[in-house]
Image (cartoon, rainbow, N blue to C red):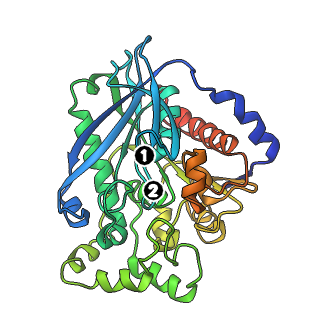
Amino acid sequence: MRMTARCCAALLALCLPMFAVGAVPPVGERHGVAHAPSAAVRDAGHRDSVRYTVWYPAQAGAREAALTIGPPGAPLFEVGTAAADAAIAEGHWPVLLLSHGNGGSARMMGWFGIAMARAGYVVIAVDHPGNNGVDPMTEAGSILMWSRADDLAAALAAVQADPVLAEAMDATRLGVAGYSAGGFTALVAAGAGPQLQRLLAFCRAHPADGVCVPQAENPTLTLAQRMTAAQTPALAPWVAQAGDDRAIAGVRAVFLIAPAMIQAFAPEALEKVAQPVSIIVGAADTVASPATNSDIAAAALPKATLTTLPAVGHYDFLSSCTALGRKRIGALCQVAADQQATHGAAITEAKALFDAALSATR
C-alpha cells in the first residue's frame, strides 16, 4: 500500500533543533579502497579501485575536525565534522550504504552520512568511478550507471573485512540510501533492474526533461553522445548487462533523496522492490522532476512513502556552499529554501525509516 506525505514549512522549522553540531556521540571517519571489475571500465585510468568513506559512532572523547570540499584554505562546501580514524564505539551498529549523485562524491553527502552515524549507524559511502567530482568524468561512468551498485557491494565487503570496524557493525541490519543518480543506484541495489532503451525512449519523447539534458556537473556530454558511446565495442557488452540482477543481499530498507532516471525502470521492475522505501524530494526540482521521477517511483513501489518539500530544488540536497562556493560555482549553490531545514527534514525521514526497518528486534 502506498502512502503520500506532504511536508510543510512548519515541519521544516521543527526539524532544525534536532541536529545541532556537537551532538553525542562523536563521529569517526575512515577511508579505504575496494575493488570491482566494472570500475576499470568506468575509471579514466582504467583502475578497478573504488574509494570509500565510512562514518561511524566513535568512542567518547574523539576529537572532530571540520570537513570541507575544495582547495586547501579556500573551501567551496562545508560538510560537517568528524574524527579521523577514531576508535569505533562499542556496540553492533546497523549499516547504511550511501550513493552520491552524478559527478558528486562520498564527502558531498557527508551532511547526511555524518548525521546518520551520529544517530547510531555505520555509513559506507563511495566515490563512483568515472562519475565523481574528484577524478575525471568519463562517458562510461555516465552510461553504466547500474554498475554503481557493484561499487556499493564491493565497499561493503571491504568494510566487513576491516579489523577496526567489522566487529562493531551488524551487516544483517542493512539499508541503502542515495541522492539523485544515487537514488537510481539504491533501487538497483534493492533489486530493481533498469532498461537503458526505456530511458532513451523517454528522452526522445521528452528531450527537455531535466534528466535528458546535459547535466551541470558535465555540461558537454549530451544524450546523443552517451547513446553513441553505448554502442561502441568497448561499452556495448557492458550495456547489455544493464538488466542483470545487482541486488545486494540483506537490504531491508531504501531511502531516496530526489531520485533521478526513474524512467529507466519499468513498473514491474519497481514492483519487485519489496522493502519499505521512503522518498524525499523538492517541489521546485527541475533536474529530477518529481512528476517524472519521485511520483512515478512512489506509485509503483509496493511500500513507498513520499515527502515533497515546498520551494526546495535539486541541489538543496548537496552539502552547504561557502561564500566562496556561492561566488564560483553558481547553479549548484543556488538554494531558495532554508538548506539546514531541508537537510534536517531528510535526516528525520531517514532515521524514522531505518530505525523501524533495522531494529535489532526485527
Residue 258 % position (x, y): 58, 57
Residue 183 % position (x, y): 48, 57
Residue 304 visible in the shown view: no
Q: Are marks 1 and 2 in contact (CB under 8 Å)?
A: yes
Tell me if residue 253 comes above or below residue 281 in the rendering: above
Tell me if residue 120 comes above or below residue 308 in the rendering: above
Give the alpha-carbon distance from disc 1 to disc 2, as whole Å: 8 Å
Residue 62 % position (x, y): 41, 16
**Callout 2: helix, strand or loop?**
helix
Q: Please, what is the three-letter code of the amino acid marked with disc 1? A: Leu
Residue 127 % position (x, y): 34, 51
* Structural crowding at the residue carrying mark 1, measured as other residues with C-alpha within 10 Å and reported as few (<14), some (14–19) or many (≥20): many
Tell me which corner region of the image, top left, top right, bottom left or bottom right, holds residue 341.
top right
**Callout 1: helix, strand or loop?**
strand
Residue at the extreme front of the image, as rendered:
73
Residue 313 visible in the shown view: yes
Tell me which corner region of the image, top left, top right, bottom left or bottom right, holds residue 59.
top left
Residue at the extreme top of the image, as rendered:
61
Q: Earlier in the sequence, mark 1 or mark 2?
A: 1
Which residue is disc 1 drawn over?
Answer: 98
x 54%, y 32%: residue: 355
x 77%, y 40%: residue: 11
Q: Please, what is the three-letter code of the amino acid marked with disc 2? A: Gly
Which residue is disc 2 drawn over?
Answer: 182
Tell me if residue 233 comes above or below residue 91 in the rendering: below
